[in-house]
Image (spheres, helix red, strand yellow):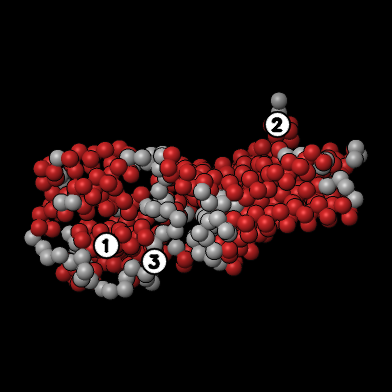
Amino acid sequence: MKIPSILKRCWKPLLTLGFGGLLFLFWMLRYPFLLLGKEEVTLFLWDKEFLRERLAAPGGLAHYIGDFLTQFFYDIRLGALVFALLFMVLQWMVWRLCKRWKKKHAEGHEQETKATGVYLLSFIPSFILWFLTGDLNVQMTYIVAVVLATALITIMPMNNKAGTIIIVIAIPLTYWFLGPVAVMLPFCVFLQSGHTCRSAIITFVALMLLAILCVVGSWWFVPYPLNQLVQGIHYCFWDSTSSAVGELLLLLAIVAIPFLCGKIGNKLGDKACWFVGVTCFLLGLLLAPRGFHDSDYEEVEYDALLRCDLWQTIYAKGKANIPSTMACRLIFGEALCRKGEASRSEMMNALTTNGVMNSQASAFIMSELYFMNNMVNKSQYAAFEAMQSGFYSKSARALRRLVETNLVTGHYKVALKYISLLEETLFYRSWAKKMRTLAEHPERIDDHPTYGPLRLAYLQSEDELFY
């Protein structure tokens, strides 16, 4: 079979695979530090109590699955693959909706099978989601909730009485497990309804009232303010108008694009559909990366470089452009010390600067810098700050540092408490088992290449925890 013939028959899945490959390279090569930044503020435990805790709030299942996927960001390659697969799955399910609604509006006309250009329109929701992920506030919970809700829509009947009854039952369940993305269901029923306009509007209003009742009703049972329940408890770190608008726009696109494809694909010619599809696809490729603003990621990027011990990269980056935040300047100062271009005494004086930890990323940075400069108590203090400044989740990275500081300072029972948590994780489990051996046999700590010298320095220095 000739290559042009293969491309003609398989161009749709090939385009989807190409889109996934592009996303993989985007995260892998351009913004790998954002993956590490998301992983370090998440703790996923293979524990029944952990699951019950997540399911006790609206959107709990999406939160649980989101945390499960985020733990794989510990390996940048796996993190990039997770993102690529999620975006590909979303696009493919939107296309399934497009085919369903295009077929419905075709009513048997031959034109329904020719307008293949509308396939490109199914990428629009994925482009919007790509744009939204540039906002550090948007969490994996929201991404998972959108993908699962779209999957639910693709398998649910919505054009008969039985389908309406199923939707009535599905809305409360979808809200509790996935969060306010459940509002997509009434819109889908309205756009896909086979009833008269009046009956469709009545059904839509009734289902929307049910969705609103679910949100307001949950307000009486869970300890969260109403505005968080409306926006999604775990969808964003902070209440942000721009994030909320973007989230709503994505939900509307998922339900509207298939409806528009049904109209466009059966009323416009094939050439017109291709023109519209190619134009939207190219605009998506151009605009989606513009949601990422490098100026917002300085601390996250420097923190990832510090975490990976990429001192040459830190040195070159700082030489090219002096960091704007104090925490990042301290990392650059440490790199200068290692190059012999700054004195260690100057670095130690700089580390005593107050007001450095004004963000979660800066707290992680200072914990690392304090630890490598023998300031164990201050490193522990910064690790606590990093973990407590997070939302709805603990931090596996912070727990690891707390294990280390408590081993050095001799608080072995406290270290064992944190070790028991890390033993329930995937990527920190083997390390935690090694630390358990040290905690249960403290005499081995003195011979450890890292913790031995730190303990000696700790015993010979003053307590600087409340410096």
| Residue 254 marker | none
Q: Is residue 87 left or right of residue 437?
A: right
Q: Amino acid at mark 1?
A: Tyr
Of discs 2 and 3, which sits in the foreground? 3
Q: Mark 3 highlights which residue?
A: 359
The residue located at (75%, 52%) in the rendering is 207
Q: Position of residue 252 (x, y in %)?
A: 71, 56
Q: Mark 2 highlights which residue?
A: 6
Q: Residue furthest bottom?
A: 354
The residue located at (15%, 51%) in the rendering is 410
Q: Is residue 429 left or right of residue 278?
A: left
Report the number of discs: 3
Which element carries disc 3, helix, strand or loop?
loop
Q: CA distance from mark 2 to mark 3?
A: 52 Å
Q: Amino acid at mark 3?
A: Ser
State whether residue 374 appears in this view: yes
Report the front residue among 199 and 350: 199
Q: Quadrant of the C terminus?
A: bottom left
Report the front residue among 123 and 341: 123
Label 1 crowd (10 A; few <14 / some 14-19 / many >=20): some
Q: Reading the chain from its start, which is encountered first: label 1 or label 2? A: 2
CB atoms of marks 1 and 3 within 8 Å: no
Label 2 crowd (10 A; few <14 / some 14-19 / many >=20): few
Which element carries disc 1, helix, strand or loop?
helix
The residue located at (78%, 57%) in the rendering is 205
Q: Mark 1 highlights which residue?
A: 381
Q: Amino acid at mark 2?
A: Ile
Q: CA distance from mark 1 to mark 3?
A: 14 Å
Q: Position of residue 236 (x, y in %)?
A: 53, 59
Q: Quadrant of residue 367?
A: bottom left
Q: Reading the chain from its start, which is encountered first: label 2 or label 3? A: 2
